[in-house]
Image: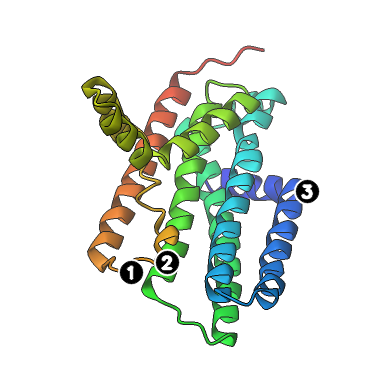
Amino acid sequence: MLNIALNTFREIVRNRFLYIIVFFAFFFILFSLLLSNLTLWESEKIIIDFWLGMIEIFGVVGVLFVGSQLLFKEIEGRTIFLILSKPIKRYDFILGKFVWFSAILALLTLAQSILFLIILSIKWLDITLLINMSLVFTWFKLEILLALVIFFSTFMGNMISILATLMVYVLSHSYSLLIDLAIRSKSEVFLLIAQISQLLFPPLEALNTKDSIGFFDGFGFTYFWLNSLYALWYTGLILFLTICIFQRKKFEN
């Protein structure tokens, strides 16, 4: 798995699209400082919302357009035959790809988070538990999306994998809206579908604590640990299903 991880690292480092994402991520995040100086009211909330939003958005873009290439390039370029002809287990191949890109996502998220917390300190803004929790939850979201995009890549094309992962991302942030619509429509079938979808889709809405900053801060350590464990469990489940599909997949010359 170490060789797969190192090859994945080299592949990602050569990917210019990732550098473009990182550049624009830091550019737009620093732009929030100028935006806050031009705003007379609620500059604190503007800085926090803008930073957290940009960290997540650019992380999602990186996962979708770089993570979706991890398997697609190997299959499309036929290098998958050379890799699998060696004494490498298929689950090592999947885990190597996932673990190393996860480490890169963690480093990028950490770098942006440190810069964010430094800016908050310079501006004498409180660094609350909810802010730190939101940063960690952002990384958990990216991990779930990475597992999903690799999962879809095992049996879908590149663009369809991106669209499918993006659809899951949007729907997973819409549970409360779907349940509210079901209650308003007074349809028990619609309500049942909304409740079942909440079990099938990842817990992204529960991890979306950044929207509560400035309105509600009653989250405790129990909420943090339970949702962290659930996110890890869901990621592990998706990886397990990915490995099961990949083990049975046949590649044609």
Q: Nearer the viewer, mark 1 or mark 3?
A: 1
Q: What amino acid type is highlighted by mark number 3?
A: Arg
Query: Which mark lies nearer to you, 2 or 3?
Result: 2
Left or right, 161 with respect to 189, comes to: right
| In this view, 112 is above or below 4 | below
Marks 2 and 1 close (CB-CB < 8 Å): yes
Q: Residue under label 2, please give it.
A: 213
Of 120 and 111, nearer the camera is 120
Q: How many marks?
A: 3
Q: Is residue 76 above or below residue 223?
A: above
Which label is found at residue 217?
1
Measure the alpha-carbon separation of dots 1 and 3. 39 Å
Taking the image as shown, residue 181 lies to the left or right of residue 139, namely left
Residue at left 58%, top 75%? 43
Residue 163, numbered label = none
Q: Nearer the viewer, residue 10 or 22?
A: 22
